[in-house]
Image (cartoon, helix red, strand yellow):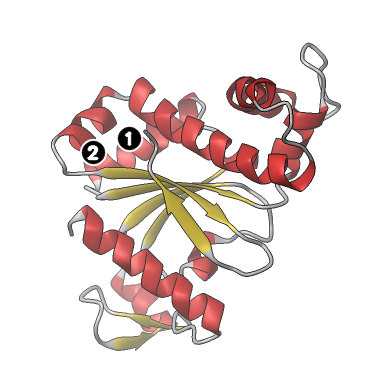
Amino acid sequence: MKPDKALECLRAGNRRFVSGETTSVINRTPDGETPLPLHRQRAALVNTQSPVAVVLGCSDSRVPPELIFDLGLGELFVVRVAGNVAGPTQVETVEFAVAVMKVPLVVVMGHSGCVAVGTALSTPDGDDPAVLATVVAAIRAEVAPFQASHPGLEGEALARRAVQVNARGAARGLLRDSADIAGRVATGRVRVLGAEYDLETGVVEYFDVD
């Protein structure tokens, strides 16, 4: 599957999710056409999988990628960590998906109301928060320069922009820290995008990482 086709698969699934017309309870065969009950789909996937995309997302319980994109068993390769940061283990996991399983699309998805991003914005530089210290430090490294260069931006407006800045930074980190991922992007075999999920509307918006 080409990256653009994989992206349209995610867009179509999110449209179904937002409109309440989800179909993943009755999953699809690998050709994407024939409805198949989940118990039969599970059996068909025992020895194979062909996910259409990797989603590096936040661990927040309100942001389950399979539901948001209305996809089922074997259709998404999901990596979840608080704040959707791209540490060494996340980079290696995404690299495995694109190199071994030939997944054509990587989406780093932040979300509105992210507690980890909010903590990074509210905790002074040099102070360690009570929880998620390593995660918050990684997020702060991305959002602090943006916050400093936009002193008039605050509140919800700042939080929303910071979610995007953090997702874009994590996506860039994948390209910076994995020569394999970067090489596949350079040759058009893989596309890497940032995204933001809106908790209120259910809509996913995408943006380039440049």
**Above-or-below relation of 159 to 178:** below
Residue at 44% x, 84% y is 23
Label 1 sits on residue: 95
Residue at the far top: name it: 126
- CA neighbours of label 1 inside 10 A, class few (<14), some (14 to 19), many (20+): many
Residue 49, visible in the rendered structure: no
Label 2 sits on residue: 99
> Does residue 68 appear to the left or right of 7 in the view shown?
right
Residue at 32% x, 68% y is 9
Residue at the far right: name it: 130
Count the marks.
2
Where is residue 152 shown, x and y percent of the image? 74, 31
Marks 2 & 1, CB-CB < 8 Å contact: yes
Residue 19 or residue 56, whichever sits in front? 19
Q: Residue 131: name its quadrant.
A: top right
- CA neighbours of label 2 inside 10 A, class few (<14), some (14 to 19), many (20+): some
Q: Secondary structure at mark 2?
A: helix
Residue at the far front: name it: 152
Residue 142, visible in the rendered structure: yes
Where is residue 136 shown, x and y percent of the image? 70, 27
Residue at 68% x, 61% y is 62
Q: Residue 138: name its quadrant.
A: top right
Indicate the amino acid at tag 1.
Glu
**Above-or-below relation of 187 to 13:** above
Indicate the amino acid at tag 2.
Ala
Where is residue 193 shown, x and y percent of the image? 38, 45
Q: Secondary structure at mark 1?
A: helix
Q: How far apart are labels 2 and 1 at the CA level?
A: 6 Å
> Does residue 121 appear to the left or right of 186 in the view shown?
right
Specify the quadrant that holds the C terminus. top left
> Does residue 95 appear to the left or right of 169 in the view shown?
left
